[in-house]
RNA sequence: GCUCUGGUGGUGGAAUAGGUAGACACGCAGGACUUAAAAUCCUGUGGGCAGCAAUGCCCGUACGGGUUCGAUUCCCGUCCGGAGCACCA
């Protein structure tokens, strides 16, 4: 009997499913541990060998934690709403649900083959009405709450209405859009519609005007990553900037908390950095400039982080979208400004980005008065100022800001240096260092002191205040698409009203086509009778991140009809202890989920303020493409080493036709009709292919399917090999080449238990050498798994098994422990061996062996050493070394003079049989 | 431009409270078994020099400096790759 992986794996996969081995229930008698994978979008292409990398790592960790006595929640599901299924539906007419169901089935099959220990009874699909009921529910909660800065939490809208009725909105400190001040009396006088309009500005889920990427041909708003260079990625249609009324989530209200709470998370520094960067907190001041267009005067507020440079302001700049532009454009400049605005509006976001080096702008004709110097400076309009940040207007200090500098150079505006010794003849001096000059009362101060001093003066003079700004914007939440969660909102005389919670889910209606309507409405405009009590229902759907923002909560209690998650379930499982997934979600999903979690936490539905305690980013697995070289205008292919002698074309060849860069020439001829008559110029009788690391994709013919690996080598080999490939966090190309080594290892393991079909496990007591090998391994595997260093763990297994083989160790005690250690990595084989050792229960219920240090300590002895009778020291050696040898070595050390001069010896570095260094 | 991250044999990668660099694996070469192949097993494998040989010596962790008895590891500078952000005032 050989190691028949294919039979073993089938047997145990069936067994686990039948016995429900990985079912978990909340069990207060045991400590819990929650391990989560970022659930996949089930694409039509199926899984390639790169996808399971993180899943394998999390599965190893889950299985390890079970062996350590934890009650482990390890669920899986599908992020099933999304654009590809909808695009496919538009092309083929096939319902996205059908496509999605089919893709999920295929994913499930592929996942099952790898032997994951998921509790499938907890599976969630975001497109399930039973699931998206709670996505809609959360949205309604956000609609029904506002963010109070005084209490730093979300509070019910009803409470806000009570405040308005009692005292108007002047004292309210809320995260909100611009709202005019009103009194209680005024509020009392407003009608229903007016009140709804005002409240909308306070809601956490709100409708507001915002600039979006609008694609007329597709009839939908697109996210930035769906647009490239002003053209939609799918279809290649032009995209324009358009102001539209869209549902938005007031993520920005939580900016400070999202930033501060990063502190306690066990995430990598680089990921935290990415989020910090994205949130982009900057501390500065708002400052009021008196502006005049010749007939009227206004107070215009700007934001700056460099209040200290106010003496160097030589012009002001407005964003093209700023409302100040209209007020401050003088008649004689009107034409020029209009022309500039039209040109700017036409450009897409991408075009603006691409042209960041070009400096453009136009003068408004108006002037602003510097509040410190009283000097009048011109007001310009330019694209380099963004309307969405700060106040959409800036004070320009060309000497100390490179963007202002470029602008000043372009339009010949003055540049006044403010820091002693700063040379601004060629570039600005942006660093926040040096001593101030030309700056009135700030002269002589360091920049570090001048910034707060300037802000203090601004506040004293009542011309501004300290202010913190964030880069983080509110999330645009509507998409003009079909395949997403419908909004549980209807419009009563144009006023958005929530559909009662008790009537959720609001299920996605059927439509005849998945395209926008002829009148430009979203696809839901095609649904018959898409109304509530006769009122029209919102026709947009929610974006992809809606369904993925709280799925980790749903897994805790997936079949609950009364709540997203019950209090008991949430208090037991709390939050995700370990989350594994790709970095690509750093500023999307991981921000939204944290926001969503904090919101529900504010409302008291859940008990943890952060969703993901520890987060590990697995690297991307790239493809390793192979090439053949066709001699130009022939059907002859020349091997890599000889290709320089000819003029050749490089052609991608399917990596499945290549082994160790050797082409299977027969298979190549059969691959495509074009190559049926291919001729080859070989070297040493072989055709050697070239190779390169590229993205894994069909068009590069470098996709490796895990099914194929499972078939050829088995799931256990695949699992171990994926781990062996390198550090989990690192991106690396897939290369099947090394897999034989891992497979060989598993066969060697098998041979410790069986010879020629006979079970050769003995009950004789374990000998010392074998115990040492085992306990070294226990220690290594334990520390490696805890440290996510799975690749070195696999190496440690190989070394240990080689040693046990050399020791001819077939001892039961040793092998039982070895089998348990191996079970997270190669669970099928471990189960089979566990059974062979006489156990009936699954190995997942076993206990991780305890490391005993005493077994691994080297035979040591202490050597007292003395020099000139002056001092003695002791050293421990792993191999016999006579005191004489030690002393001789010490004296031979070139630095011995130091010792002889009286320097104390701190340490002696010894390797078996040799002293390598003496530390004084 | 800014932030982060990395650079070690033919290849993937080990080793950092500073202490035998290249574990383990692949590949390659040679050998054993075999009619042959596959599979399996054994040996060698960073570069250079010397030697019949055991072996010895020198150079080597992107490059240049520094700290140290000792640097792949720490510090400064340069070059190259990868990721993210990108006019955020």
Image (tube, coloured by chain):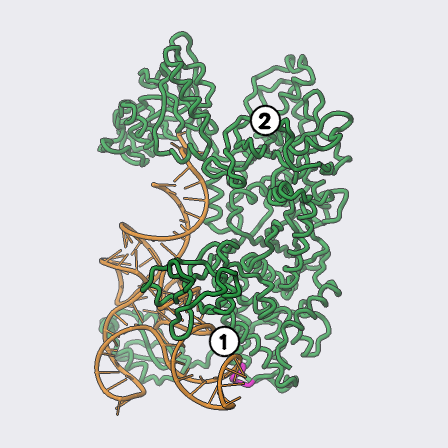
Chain colours: A green, B orange
For the point 47% across and 41% down, the residue is: A276
In the rendered image, the vertical position of residue A384 relative to residue A265, given as above or below: above
Secondary element at image label 1: helix
Residue A245 is marked as 2
SS under mark 2: strand
In this rendering, position of residue B38 left or right of residue A109: left
Residue A805 falls within the magenta-colored stretch: yes
Q: Is residue A232 magenta?
A: no
Closer to us: A111 or A149: A111
User: Looking at the figure, which quarter contains the N terminus of chain A?
Assistant: bottom right
Look at 47% across and 44% down and name the residue there: A274
For the record, the magenta segment spans A804-808
Numbered badge on residue A799: 1
Q: Position of residue A797 (x, y in %)?
A: 53, 73
Q: CA distance from mark 2 to mark 1?
A: 64 Å
- Going from N to C along the chain, the mark reached first, 2 or 1, is 2
Prevailing SS of the magenta stretch: helix
Residue A898 visible in image: yes
The reply to the same-chain question for discs 2 and 1 is yes
Nearer the observer: mark 2 or 1; the answer is: 2
Residue found at the very far top of the displayed protein: A295
Measured as percent of width and height from the top left, residue A772 is found at 52, 79
Q: Quadrant of the C terminus of chain A?
A: bottom left
Nearer the observer, A845 or A114:
A114
């Amino acid at each position: 009997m050989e190691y028949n992986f294919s039979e073993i794996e089938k047997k145990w996969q069936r067994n686990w499913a039948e016995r429900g081995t990985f079912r978990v229930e909340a069990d207060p008698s045991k400590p819990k541990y929650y391990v989560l994978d970022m659930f996949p979008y089930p694409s039509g292409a199926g899984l390639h060998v790169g996808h399971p990398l993180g899943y394998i790592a999390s599965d190893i960790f889950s299985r390890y934690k079970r062996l350590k006595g934890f009650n482990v929640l390890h669920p899986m599901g599908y992020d099933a709403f999304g654009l590809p299924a909808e695009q496919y539906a538009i092309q083929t007419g096939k319902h996205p649900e059908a496509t999605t169901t089919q893709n999920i089935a295929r994913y499930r099959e592929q996942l099952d083959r790898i032997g994951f220990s998921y509790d499938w009874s907890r599976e969630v699909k975001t497109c399930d009405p039973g699931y998206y009921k709670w996505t809609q529910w959360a949205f309604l909660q956000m609609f029904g709450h506002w963010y109070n800065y005084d209490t730093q939490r979300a509070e019910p809208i009803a409470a806000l209405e009570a405040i308005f009725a009692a005292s108007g909105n002047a004292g309210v400190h809320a995260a909100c859009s611009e709202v005019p001040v009103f009194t209680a009396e005024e509020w009392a006088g407003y009608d229903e519609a007016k009140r709804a309009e005002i409240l909308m500005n306070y809601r956490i889920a709100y409708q507001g005007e915002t600039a979006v990427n609008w694609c007329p041909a597709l009839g939908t708003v697109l996210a930035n990553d769906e647009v490239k260079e002003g053209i939609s990625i799918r279809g290649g249609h032009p995209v324009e900037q358009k102001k539209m009324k869209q549902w938005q989530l007031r993520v920005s209200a939580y900016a400070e908390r999202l930033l501060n709470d990063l502190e306690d998370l066990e995430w990598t520094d680089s990921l935290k950095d990415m989020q910090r960067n994205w949130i982009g907190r900057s501390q500065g001041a708002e400052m009021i400039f008196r502006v005049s267009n010749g007939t009227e005067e206004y107070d215009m507020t700007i934001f700056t982080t460099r209040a200290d440079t106010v003496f160097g302001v030589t012009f002001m700049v407005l964003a093209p979208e700023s409302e100040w532009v209209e007020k401050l454009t003088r008649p004689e400049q009107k034409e020029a400004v209009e022309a500039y605005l039209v040109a700017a509006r036409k450009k897409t976001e991408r075009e603006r980005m691409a042209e960041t080096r070009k400096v453009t702008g136009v003068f408004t004709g108006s002037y602003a008065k510097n509040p410190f110097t009283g000097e009048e400076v011109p007001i310009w309009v330019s694209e380099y100022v963004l309307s969405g940040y700060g106040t959409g207007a800036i004070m320009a200090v060309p000497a100390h800001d490179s963007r202002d500098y470029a602008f000043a150079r372009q339009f010949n505006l003055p540049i006044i240096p403010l820091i002693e010794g700063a040379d601004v003849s060629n570039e600005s001096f942006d660093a926040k260092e040096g001593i101030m000059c030309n700056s009135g009362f700030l002269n002589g101060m360091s920049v570090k002191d001048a910034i707060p001093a300037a802000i203090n003066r601004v506040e004293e003079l009542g011309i501004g205040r300290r202010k913190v700004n964030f880069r983080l914007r509110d999330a645009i939440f509507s998409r003009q698409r079909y395949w997403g969660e419908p909004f549980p909102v209807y419009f009563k005389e144009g006023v958005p009203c929530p559909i009662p919670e008790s009537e959720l889910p609001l299920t996605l209606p059927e439509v005849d086509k998945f395209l926008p309507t002829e009148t430009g409405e979203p696809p839901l405009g095609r649904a018959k009778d898409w109304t509530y009590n006769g009122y029209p229902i919102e026709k947009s759907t929610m974006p992809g991140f809606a369904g993925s923002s709280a799925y980790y909560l749903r897994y805790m209690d997936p079949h609950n009809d009364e709540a997203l998650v019950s209090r008991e379930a949430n208090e037991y499982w709390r939050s995700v202890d370990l989350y594994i997934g790709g970095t690509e979600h750093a500023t999307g999903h991981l921000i939204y989920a944290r926001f969503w979690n904090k919101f529900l936490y504010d409302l008291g539905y859940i008990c943890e303020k952060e969703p993901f305690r520890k987060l590990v980013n697995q690297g991307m697995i790239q493809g390793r493409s192979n090439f053949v070289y066709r001699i130009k205008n022939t059907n002859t292919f020349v091997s890599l080493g000889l290709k320089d002698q000819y003029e050749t074309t490089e052609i991608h060849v399917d990596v499945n036709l290549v082994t160790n860069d050797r082409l299977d020439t027969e298979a190549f001829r059969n691959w495509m009709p074009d190559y049926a008559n291919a001729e080859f110029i070989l070297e040493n009788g072989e055709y050697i292919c070239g190779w390169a690391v590229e993205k894994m994709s069909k068009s590069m013919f470098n996709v490796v399917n895990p099914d194929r690996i499972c078939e050829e080598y088995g799931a256990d080999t695949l699992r171990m090999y994926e781990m062996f490939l390198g550090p989990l966090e690192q991106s690396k190309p897939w290369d099947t080449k090394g897999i034989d080594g891992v497979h060989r290892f598993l066969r060697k393991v098998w041979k410790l238990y069986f010879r020629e079909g006979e079970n050769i496990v003995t009950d004789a007591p374990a000998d010392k050498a074998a115990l040492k090998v085992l306990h070294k391994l226990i220690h290594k595997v334990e520390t490696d798994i805890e440290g996510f260093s799975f690749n070195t763990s696999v190496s440690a297994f190989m070394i240990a098994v080689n040693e046990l083989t050399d020791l001819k160790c077939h001892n039961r005690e040793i092998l039982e422990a070895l089998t348990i250690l191996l079970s997270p990595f190669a669970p099928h084989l471990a189960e089979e061996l566990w059974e062979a050792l006489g156990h009936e229960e699954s190995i997942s219920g076993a206990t991780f062996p305890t490391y005993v240090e005493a077994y691994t300590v080297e035979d040591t002895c202490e050597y007292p050493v003395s020099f000139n009778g002056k001092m003695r020291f002791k050293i421990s050696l792993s191999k016999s070394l006579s005191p004489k040898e030690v002393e001789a070595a010490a004296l031979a050390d070139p630095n011995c003079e130091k010792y002889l001069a009286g320097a104390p010896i701190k340490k002696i570095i010894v390797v078996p049989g040799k002293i390598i260094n003496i530390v004084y």
